[in-house]
Amino acid sequence: MKPYVICHMMSSIDGHALTDGWDRPFKKNAGALYETLAQQFKFDAWICGRVTMQEIAHGDGYPAGLATGPIPRTHHFAVRDAACYAVSIDPHGKVAWKSNQALDSHVVAVVTEAVSDDYLAYLQSIKVSYIFGGKTEIDLAQVVTILATELGTERLIVEGGPHVSGSFVNAGLVDEISVLILPLIDGRGEHPASFEITQEAWTKPTYLSLASAEVQDGGAVWLRYKK
Ligand SMILES: NC(=O)c1ccc[n+]([C@@H]2O[C@H](COP(=O)([O-])OP(=O)(O)OC[C@H]3O[C@@H](n4cnc5c(N)ncnc54)[C@H](OP(=O)(O)O)[C@@H]3O)[C@@H](O)[C@H]2O)c1
């Protein structure tokens, strides 16, 4: 069982994904348009990588010493009937959540079995759900299967950052790619591309079919591709 997976990214014309250094109103409008378009996908779960989730969580660490003993490496669901889930790919347990909600969605941390007992105890204490995505590394195919079987996820949107989006594409798990091309050239070669795949992980290019191209107010272009 696998949910329908859409990967939604925004990008400069030259293919870069980071917005730091962009004018504040431009960045704000781009972010608002990106989120409005995302809503059209009617998803029941959204996924971001650990780096992006740290920006959303805004936390500064978590208390040490919460675990009173070893915690079993079994999935833990604090909530099973949320309207939407915020899924955080966080293998080592770094994101400091302040609550079990992120942008009105129930947080599900995807960790590995190598995570600390203290981190699991901390997630339990704030009623964040967690699942195990692998022993020491995260297997994204396993993650989407768990989300479908345990939480009934049918439509999943991957919203970056570039490393998680690239990993989903490279794993062959994405049914649809959505890219909002913004009317600017970033030009900083050291900035990540919208989809990043490490040299060791890269297998082959991913070929796509254009499904639609829509010009948006303000000059952005929304491109949708199917596998
Ligand atoms: N343009 C856009 O549409 C868009 C969308 C979202 C975010 N962003 C921006 O992107 C930036 C962050 O992007 P990022 O690429 O550096 O980080 P990211 O994709 O948000 O997170 C990457 C991290 O996820 C963890 N991870 C675990 N398994 C993974 C796997 N199989 N594949 C990839 N990651 C895995 C790793 O955490 P560990 O390092 O802990 O092992 C890895 O460092 C932020 O500045 C954010 O604002 C842009």
Image (cartoon, rainbow, N blue to C red):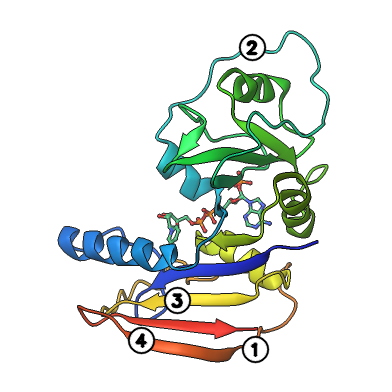
Label annotation for residue 59: none
| Disc nearest the viewer among 4 and 3 | 4
Q: Residue 91, how many percent across, how many down? A: 68, 42
Give the Cα distance between marks 1 and 4.
20 Å
The residue where tag 3 is placed is 179
Question: Mark 2, residues whose alpha carbon is within 10 Å: few (<14), some, or many (≥20)?
Answer: some
The residue where tag 2 is placed is 66
The residue where tag 4 is placed is 214
Amino acid of disc 1: Tyr
Is residue 130 found left or right of 54 in the rendered image?
Answer: right
Disc 1 or 3, which lies upstream in sequence? Answer: 3
Give the Cα distance between marks 4 and 3.
11 Å
The residue where tag 1 is placed is 207
Q: Residue 59, how many percent across, how many down? A: 43, 30
Give the Cα distance between marks 4 and 2.
51 Å
Disc 1 or 4, which lies upstream in sequence? Answer: 1
Amino acid of disc 4: Glu
Name the residue at 79% across, 54% down.
Answer: 142
Is residue 129 found left or right of 57 in the rendered image?
Answer: right
Give the Cα distance between marks 1 and 2.
48 Å
Amino acid of disc 2: Leu
Name the residue at 54% across, 38% down.
Answer: 106
Screen quadrant of the N terminus: bottom right
Q: Quadrant of residue 184?
A: bottom left
Name the residue at 28% across, 80% down.
Answer: 216
